[in-house]
Amino acid sequence: GQPLLEVRNLKKHYAVRNSLGKTTGYVRAINDISFTIYEGETYGLVGESGCGKSTTGRTLLRLVEPTSGEAQFNGNNIFDLNRKELRGIRKDLQMIFQDPHTSLDPKRKVGYSIEESLIINGVKSKEERKRLVTEMLVKLGFNENDYNRFPHEFSGGQRQRIGIARSLILNPKLIICDEPVSALDVSIQAQIINLLKDLQKQLTLSYLFISHDLSVVRHIADRIGVMYLGNLVEQGTTEEIFSNPLHPYTKGLLSAVPVINESSEREKIEITGEIPSPINPPSGCVFRTRCPFAFERCSQESPAEIHVGEHRSVKCHLYDHK
Ligand code: SF4
Ligand code: MG
């Protein structure tokens, strides 16, 4: 497919101040990351909580303003758009959040929550809006009377399906899904993942799928980016990441995921210790305080992103054979 979203050198840094307003440190929430999402594909962004993956999604939606970088989407740099222009691209760029309970207004009929975007986007006829919303509800397995029900009348999985209906109503190209199944029971997770995959095929959607759970991402992503302390430390196809992880952090994450039917020869790496604070992170490689392979250079120099294949990159001195 064609590139749909091209994120280049995205950074989000901010100062931490004490109660007297004095700057005491800097958080490098996102530290110079670049990735591309192609039409019709799912790009999985994985990493532990606090690694910057949600912040990345939120900058693309301009819920958080980036420090620098670009995000080309539909011929525009998202970060250059003013409020009015942003509303214009919202049609093509939608989101699904972790907790549909808090993202749906409890006092509003769910049909109205879906209809709202149509109103904002200028669909004037009430009959037309009602028809589109009803059609979407039916497509996602509800019946027309569900329009008039309230969020609390639905289960968690149903509420997430309503969230999906809402994200689809304007016929978007890209949906940013931030931990969309993390709040759900495992059996429901699989249903939602399968639904997202079916919808993707029917509607040629692309997803940026953000999750801390590699085993979930494995079921939906075509390609994966692994984040650690604001850095994109490895990228590859899902197949490559699982069969041949390169970065020590990726190897460690995978060692913690139970594997079925896979050569058990894969190197097992145990990551010890805690994630360092993102305020004043370690010098050199941000992973060095937990890396079993760290050597002298790792504390002195931040590793560059080394491209080792068409869609494959790794940020680690071990792969720098210059
Ligand atoms: Fe480990 Fe050094 Fe590679 Fe960082 S650069 S992951 S510390 S070997
Ligand atoms: Mg998060």
Image: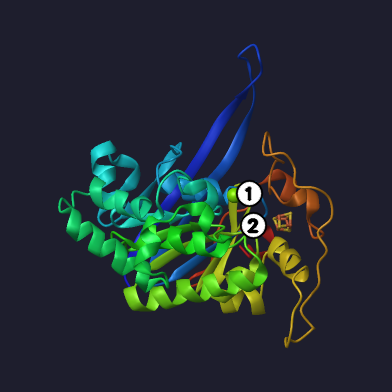
Q: Mark 1 points at which residue?
A: 51
* Left or right: where 2 falls relative to 97: left
Q: The disc labelled 1 sits on which kind of residue?
A: Cys
* Residue 82 visible within the image: no
Give residue 103's position: percent from left, percent from top: 48, 48
In the image, residue 242 sits, relative to residue 66, either above or below, namely below
Q: The disc labelled 2 sits on which kind of residue?
A: Gly
From the viewer's side, name the closer residue of 182 and 138.
138
* Residue 293 visible within the image: yes
Dot label at residue 289: none
Q: Is mark 1 within 8 Å of ligand 2?
A: no
Q: Is mark 2 on a helix, strand or loop?
A: loop
Dividing the picture into quadrants, the one containing residue 295 is: bottom right
Instruction: Please report the residue visible at 51 percent of the width from the left and 76 percent of the height from the top.
Output: 194
Give residue 280's position: percent from left, percent from top: 68, 34
Instruction: Please report the residue visible at 81 percent of the width from the left and 59 percent of the height from the top.
Output: 271
From the viewer's side, name the closer residue of 321 and 240.
240
Dividing the picture into quadrants, the one containing residue 206 is: bottom left
Tell me the distance, in whole angstroms, between the alpha carbons under discs 1 and 2. 6 Å
Number of labels in the image equals 2
Give residue 277's position: percent from left, percent from top: 72, 39
